[in-house]
């Protein structure tokens, strides 16, 4: 984080779009329901917390770090990520390693939005996890 300052002007839009296409959603086009959700979402809370750029955190979460407290989470946790995700597989592994009762799944054909990029596998993974832990 913080390797490059946030870009300004037309170049920022081009870079941001390429970043999103590579690491957030690797789909040729958005499903209609996803496009509607994005258009109708209030982005102000996201901007306040994360910042204006997807690729560089500048918001109030910039210095937030809870890794030292992950061991306090004692419920089963499913940690997922995509092979091309902006949250890298190494970061997913580190998060899962900090949670005492976690399971980790990497979606090999996805970036950040496996629920839309690999919906059948995603629903199967989440459903299996919930089935195994529902009785608790």
Image (spheres, helix red, strand yellow):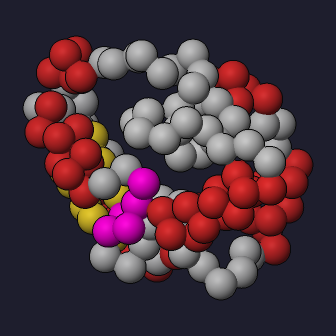
Q: How many marks?
A: 0
Q: Is residue 96 visible?
A: no
Give the residue drawn at x 66%, y 44%. 7
Question: Which quarter of the image is occupied by the C terminus?
Answer: top left
As for residue 104 lying within the magenta part, the answer is no
Would you place residue 118 above or below residue 104 in this image? Answer: below
Would you place residue 10 above or below residue 108 in this image? Answer: above
Residue 28 in the figure: left or right of residue 132: right
Nearest the viewer among 77 and 127 is 77
* Residue 51, position as x, y percentages in the image: 64, 30
Question: Which quarter of the image is occupied by the N terminus?
Answer: top left
* Residue 129, position as x, y percentages in the image: 29, 56
Nearest the viewer among 107 and 74 is 107
Q: Quadrant of residue 81?
A: bottom left
Residue 96 in the figure: left or right of residue 109: left
Nearest the viewer among 41 and 65 is 65
Residue 130 in the figure: left or right of residue 67: right
* Residue 73, position as x, y percentages in the image: 24, 23
Q: Quadrant of residue 47?
A: top right
* Residue 55, position as x, y percentages in the image: 53, 46
Determine the residue located farthest toward the bottom in the rendered image: 28
Q: Quadrant of residue 77?
A: top left
Give the residue drawn at x 33%, y 19%. 65
Q: Over which residues does the magenta segment extend?
A: 82-86
């Amino acid at each position: 984080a913080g390797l490059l300052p946030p870009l300004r002007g037309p170049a920022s839009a081009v870079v941001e779009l390429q970043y999103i296409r590579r690491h957030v959603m690797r789909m040729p086009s958005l499903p209609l329901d996803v496009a509607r959700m994005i258009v109708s979402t209030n982005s102000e809370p996201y901007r306040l917390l994360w910042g204006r750029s997807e690729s560089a955190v500048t918001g109030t979460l910039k210095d937030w770090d809870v890794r030292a407290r992950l061991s306090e989470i004692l419920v089963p946790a499913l940690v997922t990520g995509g092979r091309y995700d902006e949250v890298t597989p190494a970061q997913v592994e580190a998060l899962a390693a900090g949670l005492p009762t976690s399971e980790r799944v990497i979606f090999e054909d996805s970036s950040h939005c496996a629920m839309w990029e690999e919906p059948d596998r995603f629903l199967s993974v989440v459903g299996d996890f919930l089935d195994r832990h529902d009785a608790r």
